[in-house]
Image: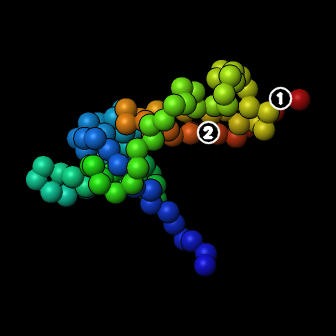
Amino acid sequence: MEAKGLTPILNVSDIASTVAWFEKWGWKKLWDWGTPPTFGAVGSGKETCIFLCQGAQGGRGRGANTTTFQQDGDEEGDMPWNVREMHLRHPDGHVFRVGRGFEPKK
């Protein structure tokens, strides 16, 4: 089977505050369902979408890790594979890894 797309579902504690959190990063609310909403989606660009489910589907990203890079790693160091990245941790613990490749200076 070849996957043509992927839509993650994040289990969140509050739909409205999660939508507001994503909007800070330039994402937009696509839709929500229920009164008050308990399911919804945010998107970026034409094809990137994440479903949000309040207190039901999916798991929370909380754990004992205090770093999103390697344990005892330098979170400000350059990546040796020519990528600059940042990690965003949602208040419910989900971690988003955002990166961009580059050509090294010669």
The residue where tag 2 is placed is: 99
User: Coloured how?
Assistant: rainbow
- Viewer-side label of 2, 1: 2
Check the image and report above or below for 68 versus 6.
Answer: above
Residue at image location 51% in from the left, 40% down from the top: 96
Q: Secondary structure at mark 1?
A: loop
* Sequence-first tag of 2 and 1: 2
Name the residue type under label 1. Answer: Lys
The residue located at (78%, 38%) in the rendering is 81
Q: Residue furthest front?
A: 64
User: Is 95 left, or right, of 69 in this rendering?
Assistant: left
Residue 33's place in the image compared with 82, above or below, is: below
Q: Disc 2 on helix, strand or loop?
A: strand
Distance, label 2 to label 1, CA atoms, is 18 Å
Is residue 76 among the parts visible in the rendering? yes
In x, y percent, where is residue 27? Answer: 38, 43
Q: Is residue 97 left or right of residue 32?
A: right
Report the residue at 79% width, 33% height from top. Answer: 80
Look at mark 1 in the image and give the residue it sits on. 105
The residue shown at (56%, 39%) is 97
Residue 48, how many percent across, how many down?
A: 46, 55
